[in-house]
Amino acid sequence: MLLSKLDKPLVSVNWLHENLMASNLIVLDATIPKVTDSDTFVNKDIIPNTLFFDLKQKFSDVSAPFPTTFPTLKQFEREAQKLGIQQNSILVVYDDKGIYSRPRVWWLFKVFGFHNVAVLDGGLPAWKAARFEVSKYYEVVKTEGDFIAKKPENQMYFFEDIQQNVKSNQRLVIDARSKERFKSLIDEPRSGLRRGTIPNSVNMPFENLLDSGIMKSETKLQAIFSKIAKPNDALAFSCGSGITACVLALGAELAGYQNLAVYDGSWTEWGSLTTE
């Protein structure tokens, strides 16, 4: 069975269970530990037929001074090919926290011009709650893929872009960190990183888009975003290191917003390179 293109960037665990054996479906586990976690990947449960998507080491620029930095086109293309990803593949990405790191993978593929990728709503917790089968072993790639990455346009913002945006206010910057971090009421989890916010930014904690790890309905997402942005507004999303900013990007796309960007370095970079 071959799957055709995806209609939306979010699929349910029931959909995945029904289509798990499709010949062009590739399931990716993009789990990463949070900065405060001591997670281990030893003998953990995974969804059957899953490949591990190494977001930190294979799909980030590890030579960069900040975590999970945007990779080069060639790096991303080569590593995707090593995972057996084809031009006609359908990708479903999950993590073990519900919705945390996997929207970053969805966003990376979008930035590099590949759109047949969706986030698994609720991730591994929802899969296990539905009592679907789990495995202990990742799949082994048998055939290298023919994936071709396209040159990114303006979906990823960098330090200079945000510097310019602070002056121009062309995009509304929305910060996915907690209210306490956004208002500088508590320390940042990364040692030595100062408290603060990007000038002119507003706060929308990424958890506000979720109900127990499940994305809220499109109607509820539209109501949330409409409080701070009009449908045609240009939006840029930030967080601590560019991970949960992509949760907001996913929510915004589901709510119908189209002119979206993610600030790659987010507060880790901005707070390190600026003093106010």
Image (cartoon, rainbow, N blue to C red):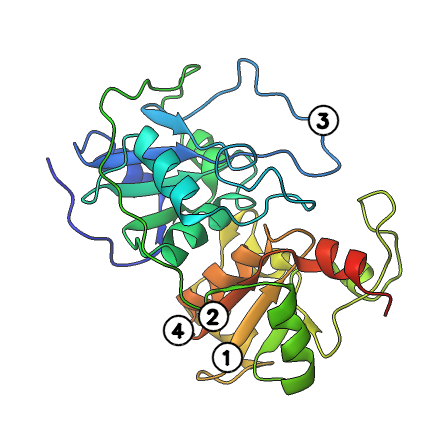
| Helix, strand or loop status at disc 3 | loop
Query: Few, some or many C-alpha atoms within 10 Å of disc 1 (few <14, some 14-19, many ≥20)?
Result: some
Location of residue 174 with respect to 26 vertically, above or below: below
The percent position of residue 267, horizontal first and vertical second, equals 72, 58
Residue 67 found in image quarter: top right
Q: Which is more N-terminal, label 2 or label 3?
A: 3
Instruction: Residue 40: tell me if it is visible.
Output: yes
> Which residue is rendered at x = 30% and y = 53% of the image?
114
Question: What is the secondary structure assignment of the residue under circle 1?
Answer: loop
Circle number at residue 234: 1
Tag 2 and tag 1, C-beta contact below 8 Å:
yes
Residue type at mark 1 is Ala
Q: Position of residue 56 (x, y in %)?
A: 56, 36
Q: Which residue is drawn at 55% across and 53% down?
A: 211
Between discs 4 and 3, the one toward the N terminus? 3
Cα–Cα gap, marks 4 and 3 = 37 Å
Residue 260's mark? 2
Relative to 183, residue 7 above or below = above
Q: Which amino acid does label 3 sit on?
A: Ser
Pick the residue in front: 145 or 110: 145
**Mark 4 to mark 1: distance in Å?**
12 Å
The residue beneath circle 3 is: 38
| Front disc: 3 or 2 | 2
Ranked by sequence position, the earlier of labels 4 and 1 is 1
Nearer the camera: disc 4 or disc 1: 1
